[in-house]
Image (cartoon, grey):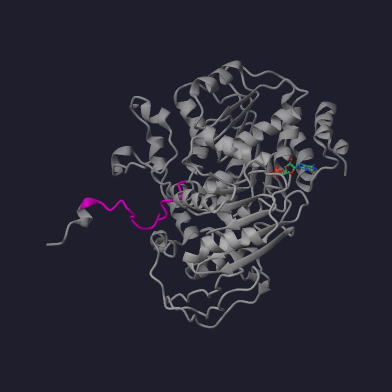
Amino acid sequence: MSFESLGLSAPVLQAVAEKGYTKPTLIQEKAIPICLMGRDVLGCAQTGTGKTASFVLPMIDILSEGRAKARMPRSLILEPTRELAAQVAENFEIYGKYHKLNMALLIGGVSFPDQERALERGADVLIATPGRLLDHFERGGILLNDVKILVIDEADRMLDMGFIPDVERIVATLPPLRQTLFFSATMPPEIKRLADRFLSNPKEVTVAPPASASKNIVQGLAVVPEEDKREALRALIKEQDIKNAIVFCNRKKDVAILQGSLKKHGFNAGALHGDMSQPARMETLEKFKQGEIQILVASDVAARGLDIVAMSHVFNFDVPFSPEDYVHRIGRTGRAGNTGHSFTLASPDEGGLVEAIEKLIGTEIPRVEVPGIQTVAFEASDGRRRGRGRGRGGSSSSSSRSRSSSSRPPREPRPEAEARPEREARPEREARPEREARPPREPRAERPPRQPRPEREPRPEREARPPRERRPERSDRADRPRQDRRDRDDTPAPMGLGDHVPAFLARPAR
Ligand code: AMP
C-alpha cells in the first residue's frame, strides 16, 4: 500500500516523501484512514511501529481547516513524559511544514510564560504532559471546551506512572463530542476499561501481539552476582560491536553511579533520569542522538518511547520490575527494520522478575555468559541457589540455564542491593485493582495528611501558588505509588512504608 492511497492531502504527502518514507507502516496503513473518517481509534501498538505518524498525519489534515481561539486549543495530545511530548511536537513540525498550524507544548521543567504565550496565540495542536496541563488549567490559562480531537498516547505508561486520575480529570473537562485516539503498547484489563470509558464505538487497530518483543532484537540474559554487574557490563560493552546503547537502571541513584563508573573506565557515557532539569535532559538526549554520547545510562521514565535512530544495543543493568517495561526497554533497539541486541544482567535474586518477563513474551530469553564473569544461578524462592556457578565465563554465546549449586560462599549484600528487598514483596499488577475500586474524590477532610513527596519531579509552580479553597481532585493524587516507584525510581516500595515510617510506629511498645 502507498501513502497516496490513505487519503492524506498533497502537502502532507510531500512532507512525508521529503522525510524519506516510501510506504506506510502497518499501523499507519490501518489507523490513518480511520482517523481521517473521524472515527475513534483504539490502537495497540508499540513505539517503533510508526505509531506517532499514524495520528499526527491525519490530525494535520483534519486541523488544516479552521483556526484556534486564544487559550482554546482545538486538539490535545497527552503524553506520559516530557521527552515523548517533545518528540511528538517534532513530528508535527516535520510533517506539518506545509501547513500553518499553531502548536503549543506544555511540559514540566520549562518556563510558564513561554507556554502561556503559545496558548494565547491560539493552539491548533496542544501537546502536553498531564501534570503541566492541569497546572495551566487550574491557573485559568486554558479552556478545553474547544478540543475536537484527543489523543491519549502510551496509555499503559500513564497507568504505570499514576497519571490516570489526572487524565480522567482532563478528559472530564473536554466536550463529549470529539474524536478520541487512544494508543497503548499493551492492553491490560485496566487499560481496556479506561478505553471503554473514553472512546465511542472505536475501531480497534492492533499491529503486534500485545507485549511481544520485536523479532529484530537478539536477546540475551546473563545471571551474575550483583557485585559483578558493573564488570559484566563493561565486558559486554567491550565484546559487542556497539554503535550506541542505552543502559537501563531501575533507580535514579544507580543511573548516576553507573554513569560515573563507566566514565571512570574510559567509556563515553551520559545519564538521563527524571531528577535532571529539563534543559539538561534535552541536551543529553540531543548529544546522544548526534552520537556525541555513545552510551546513555537511563531510568525508564527518561527513556520510554524515545526514538533514537538505529540504536544498536540495549542493556538492562537491572531486570525491570514490570515485565512490560522489559518489552519497552528492548524496543529502543531493533527499530525500523534494523537488527538490535539486548542484554540483561540479572542477579540471583531476580529470577522471579525474569520468569514474569518470559511468561509475558512467551519465550525464554537465551542465557549467555559474559567473558571473565562467573555465571551463577537464580535463587529458589526460599533464598537458596537453584544451581551452581559455572566458574569464569568464556564468551557470551547462548547457553542453557545452569541448575547446579554455586561453589561460592554467599556474599554480604552490597549497599545498593540492600534497597531492594521490597521488590519481591511487590506484586505490581495486583496493586492496581485497589486503585480502581476506591471511591473517587473523597472529601479532603477524611484523608490523612499526605507525606511530602520529594521523589516527584519538581513542579515548583504548583507549590508556589496560594492554597485554593477547595481542591477535592488533589485527593486523587495521594494514590500514586507507581509513579513514585517508576518515575522516581529510587523509591521502590509501594507496598511497605519504605523510609516513611510514621513516628508512632517507630516508638517501642510499652
Ligand atoms: P514511532 O513508532 O512513531 O516512534 O516511530 C518509529 C520510527 O519509525 C521513527 O524513527 C519514525 O521516523 C519512523 N517511521 C515512521 N513512519 C515511517 C515510515 N512510513 N517509513 C519508515 N520509517 C518510518
Segment colored magenta: 488-503
Which image quadrant for residue 403?
Answer: bottom right
Q: Nearer the viewer, residue 231 or 360?
A: 231
In the image, taking residue 422 as reference, residue 230 lies left or right, namely right
- List the single residue furthest toward the bottom: 404
Coordinates of residue 218 in the picture (x, y in percent) = 71, 62
- In what quadrant of the picture does the C terminus appear? bottom left
Coordinates of residue 397 in the picture (x, y in percent) = 68, 71
The answer, for residue 247, to whether it is visible in the render is: yes
- In what quadrant of the picture does the N terminus appear? top right
The answer, for residue 179, to whether it is visible in the render is: no
Coordinates of residue 384 in the picture (x, y in percent) = 44, 78
Residue 45 counted in the magenta span = no
Prevalent SS, magenta region: loop
Residue occupying the point 63% across, 44% down: 306
Which image quadrant for residue 57?
Answer: top right
Above/below status of 123 relative to 238:
above
Q: Nearer the viewer, residue 47 or 347?
A: 347
Above/below status of 103 relative to 88:
above
Ligand 1 sits in which quadrant? top right
Residue occupying the point 59% across, 32% down: 176
In the image, taking residue 467 as reference, residue 227 lies left or right, namely right
Residue 497 counted in the magenta span = yes
Above/below status of 301 relative to 138:
below
Coordinates of residue 385 in the picture (x, y in percent) = 47, 78
Q: Nearer the viewer, residue 183 or 349?
A: 349
Q: How many marks?
A: 0
Q: Nearer the viewer, residue 117 or 395?
A: 395
In the image, taking residue 475 as reference, residue 238 lies left or right, namely right
In the image, taking residue 151 as reference, residue 348 lies left or right, namely left
Residue occupying the point 56% across, 47% down: 157
